[in-house]
Image (cartoon, rainbow, N blue to C red):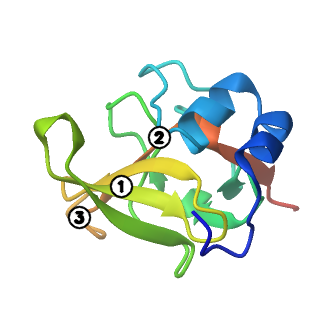
Amino acid sequence: MGEYKIDKTEAEWKEELSPEEYYVLRQKGTERPHTGALNLHFEKGDYHCKACNAKLFKSSNKFESGCGWPSFDEAIPGSIEYIRDTTHGMVRTETVCANCGGHLGHVFNDGPRETTGQRYCINSVSIGFNKAKD
């Protein structure tokens, strides 16, 4: 991972992130479903990468999917890099922060048909939230 605007050593990431954040963002881990603080969070604002603070999603694109992780039907254009993932005997599309390469989750084609049809299934620990100013 050296082709991103934010380029740090693994030692630097390990120092800056909590153990769980490091496991998900840098080692492509997954938090347990229904455990993330932002899973059922529906305030107005923006969601950003926990590692580098890049804006990734708008609250207007968040929906309750029932999958146990925060779900969005669209990302902010240019904020996500898409990588083919063939681990665990499946073919999926991994989503990583386009700014730092941090693992966010995956995107699937089973989202709301009335919008984009996409479901960005994102680890709560990999994102932070900035509340909208009134």
Return the residue found at the far bottom: 78
Looking at the rendered structure, the kind of residue marked 3 is: Gly
Which sits in the foreground, 43 or 109?
A: 109
Q: Secondary structure at mark 2?
A: loop
- What residue is shown with label 1? 94
Numbered label attached to residue 117: 3
First-in-chain label (3 vs 2): 2
Quadrant in the picture for the N terminus? bottom right
- What residue is shown with label 2? 28
Quadrant in the picture for the C terminus? bottom right
Q: Secondary structure at mark 1?
A: strand
Are the residues flagged by discs 1 and 2 in contact, CB closer than 8 Å?
yes
Instruction: Give the class, few, some or many, for how many residues have Cα within 10 Å of label 1's Cα (few <14, many ≥20).
Output: many
In the depicted structure, whether residue 57 falls above or below residue 31: below
| Residue plotted at (88% across, 61% down) | 133
| Residue plotted at (77% across, 59% down) | 53
> Can residue 38 be spotted in the picture?
no
Q: Position of residue 21 (x, y in %)?
A: 66, 33
In the depicted structure, whether residue 86 falls above or below residue 61: above
Alpha carbon distance from label 3 to label 1: 17 Å
Among the 4 quarters of the image, the one containing residue 67: top left
